[in-house]
Image: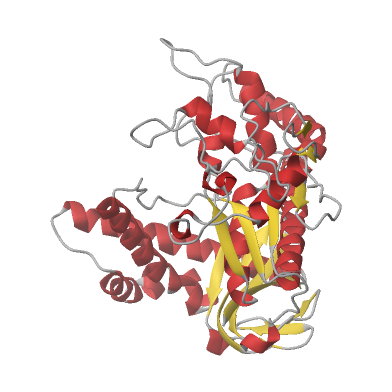
Amino acid sequence: MLIAQRLELDPIVTDRRYFAQACGCDRFTWNWALAEWNRQYEAGQKPSAMALKKQFNAIKYRDYPWIEAIHRDAHAQPFANLAKAWSRFFADIKAGKPAHAPVFKKKGKCRDSFYVANDKLTLGEHRVRLPKIGWIKLKEAPRYGGKILGASVSREADRWFLSFQIDVELSMLIGKPRREKLGVDLNTGSIDLSDGSPPLPPPKPLKQFSQRMAHLQRKASHKLECAKADVGIAKNKPWPKGHRPKQSNNLRKLNLKIARLHARISHVRTDFLHKTTTRLCRENQAITVEDLNVQGMTASATGTIEQPGRRVKQKSGLNRSVLDVGFGEFRRQLQYKSQWYGVELTMADRFYPSSQLCSTPGCDYRNKGLKLGVSEWTCPQCGTVHSRDLNAAINLENYVPRATREVKPVSAKADMICASQDESGQESNRAHFRVHLE
């Protein structure tokens, strides 16, 4: 089983300087390869990553002698990455998906990282040996042991991380399931489980640190406006193309604070998602979760000039809340962790009205008039008082996939689908958005 680990490094000043130089070497090689690829393609040739790599190796030490101070992995892997990027681009075009061609990397605007081959890496209990610089301390020990297939060093704000892919035995990941089946209902306010346990409130770090972030970004904006005035650029006018503003030490420190806050927001959200998904996969044999269309749920409501949108500000706030919880990342982690722990993961149909159906056994009532603001409702058929989210989680636990309904007798409520679909099977944007918030 191939898994990835990410450990924080504890480098000294000279190590940090080498890391920054290696990232710059990786970025320079990528830009050189992309420019040469585009030039050859426009000239009618058929460029390849291997040919570009041989062409670069023939001139790199002669034309760029500073590259010799950096290990060769940092300026060899970008060619393979570029080949993968172009292959993905043409594959998306062939499949009819939105395709994005590779773009040039700009210092300060891209992710800083460089590659290290597995035969050049030695991993210890609390340290790692990297080429050119030797042993570096790790802030935590590796969680799994096995054969390392490749690694990369990356930066977030002023912190450096080592990420590597490792081949581990499957027995190391087997959990101890205690419940046969579990339904999980995702909401912006909580994650509800069908076993009746207390709801899991997401931390919502973006909302928590939004005021702090806005304060720091306003200060940075004011400093940039002052820098514009010093060089004679009018207020609220953009910087000339190709002109790089000179940063003062205070602005540089302020940008570092903003980067640290962005990293903290990301780490808080990721920590919650990883702990929650790992716990669910370890303690259950089967999990059912809604197949939410996050892209459709978070679509902008601005509209056009001819047809302007309604309640744009409210919709943007809701979009921010949905993205802050991380519905898409939650589902992605469940998908690969369910394979690790041997869990059967079922994606419920996105039009399945889990909130509207009565979860009482033997009752087939459906509350079609249930509105978004109602958190509790009483079934008029059996008299049960339902909590909206817990009722949805129980219905997800009892969900039967549509493919099996033809051969397996089920109750009438499991055979219901959302009535917002039209005859062609395509839903309207308003009904589509309403269903996902149930």
Q: Nearer the viewer, residue 46 or 204?
A: 204
Q: Based on the displayed image, in which of its 4 quarters is residue 284 positioned?
A: bottom right
The residue sitting at 70% across, 36% down in the picture is 321
Is residue 35 in sight in this rendering?
no
Q: Nearer the viewer, residue 374 or 153?
A: 374
Where does residue 9 sit, x and y in percent of width and height?
74, 72
Left or right: where does residue 94 sit relative to residue 381? left
The answer to whether residue 324 is above or below residue 22 is above
Q: How is the image coloured?
A: secondary structure
Image quarter of the N terminus: bottom right
Left or right: where does residue 166 sit relative to residue 391? left
The residue sitting at 44% across, 61% down in the picture is 407
Where does residue 249 sit, x and y in percent of width and height?
75, 42
Q: Based on the displayed image, in which of its 4 quarters is residue 51 positioned?
A: bottom left
Q: Residue furthest top?
A: 306
The residue sitting at 50% across, 35% down in the picture is 243
Where does residue 94 sit, x and y in percent of width and height?
25, 54
The answer to whether residue 254 is above or below residue 409 is above
Q: Based on the displayed image, in which of its 4 quarters is residue 365 positioned?
A: top right
The answer to whether residue 277 is above or below residue 422 is below
Q: Nearer the viewer, residue 289 or 384?
A: 384
Image quarter of the C terminus: top right
Q: How many marks?
A: 0
Where does residue 372 sit, x and y in percent of width and height?
69, 28
Is residue 125 in sight in this rendering?
yes
The residue sitting at 13% across, 56% down in the picture is 44
